[in-house]
Amino acid sequence: MVKNVQIPNGYKQTEVGIIPSDWEICTLDYFAEIIMGQSPIGSSYNQHEMGVPLINGPTEFTERYPIKIQWTTLPTKYCREKDILICIRGSSTGRINISNNLYCIGRGVAAIRAKSNSNNIFLEYILHYAVKSILKLTSGSTFPNIDTKSLKSIKNALPSLPEQQAIAEVLGDVDALITALDALIVKKRQIKQGAMQQLLTGQRHGPPPVRMLTGRRRGMKRRRARGTGAGGARRIAACRRSRRWRTWPSRSRMATEAAGSSSTASPWPSARAPRWASSASPGAARP
């Protein structure tokens, strides 16, 4: 029994799910150009930087940008800078990198280039999202392989170009935050590794100081004690309220009070007079 799904206003039901009414359902070849790789002649390969750098498969892939390992003097198919590279053969099918140069692409790789009606970064996120669909096309195969027809037939929801740009910016900000957090985690692991090496080998006795594990600087406690760090103003106010903070009268106030009183009167207000001023004359030296 199929339950009726209530569609919100401004949305519509499509074959890929419920999407905004102004979005379209398009195949990949409608908003992207697909260039299938073709391997050059093997005798043209070299590692002496002669010709054009070659990408034959996942060997040149990294986390994001490919690296140059070999070159060819007889290039066949090219990819441009910012093209999206995707592995289409073998166990690494569906893996994605971004071209950072002009490369010759072999038959294990396809280059996908945004057309004028699509944003390149948005297209990259679309392909990452569609990787599961791409892998379904190769399920059950001993040697996974995606052909041109299969790539072109992948269906996606396509918003307007300004909305594509806005979505790409939001997802890019999230990726930047994730990258920063990953870098912080790596740093903390290195700090932990250093602490373990010192503690487990006897180079340092006892528990490690907090600053070793948290990266806190030595001078932070001193700055906070002086009232220049975070929360310093609150601590100063608390000291004043608890009479631990002695307020010294200004010179002008001392002169005014001394002129209007007897020579033996103390220039200090009774509530604020220090202990040594209660029995000493105004001209007595401070101990």
Image (spheres, rainbow, N blue to C red):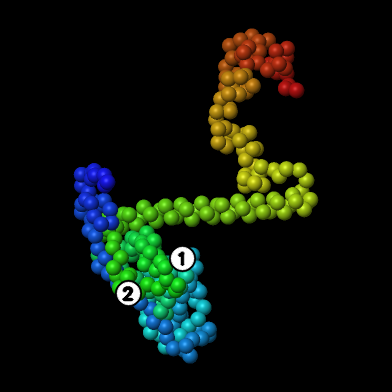
User: What's under tag 2, amino acid-wise?
Assistant: Thr
Horizontal side, residue 263 vs residue 205: left or right: left
> Residue lying farthest front?
1
**Closest to the observer, 227 or 100:** 100
Please indicate whether residue 257 sits to the left or right of residue 122 in the image.
Answer: right
Q: CA distance from mark 1 to mark 2?
A: 23 Å
Residue 40 visible in the shown view: yes
- Residue shown at the point (41%, 66%) measured from the top left: 139
In the depicted view, which residue is nearer to us: 146 or 260? 146
Q: Is residue 166 depicted above or below 118 in this figure?
A: above
Q: Is residue 10 left or right of residue 106?
A: left
Residue holding disc 1: 64
Label 2 Cα neighbours within 10 Å, binned few <14 / some 14-19 / many ≥20: few
- Label pair 1/2, CB-CB below 8 angstroms: no
Residue shown at the point (22%, 48%) measured from the top left: 11
Q: Amino acid at mark 1?
A: Arg
| Residue 273 position by quadrant | top right
Q: Name the spot of residue 252 as percent of width and height, x first.
A: 57, 22
Q: Nearer the viewer, mark 1 or mark 2?
A: 2
Could you say whether the residue bearing mark 2 is in a helix, strand or loop?
helix
Residue depicted at 49% across the width and 68% down the height: 62
Q: Is residue 133 left or right of residue 4?
A: right
Q: Is residue 104 visible?
A: no
| First in residue order: circle 1 vs circle 2 | 1
The image shows residue 274 at horizontal and vertical percentages of 68, 17
> Is label 1 in a helix, a strand or a loop?
loop
Q: Position of residue 153 (x, y in %)?
A: 28, 68
Residue 148: give its label: 2
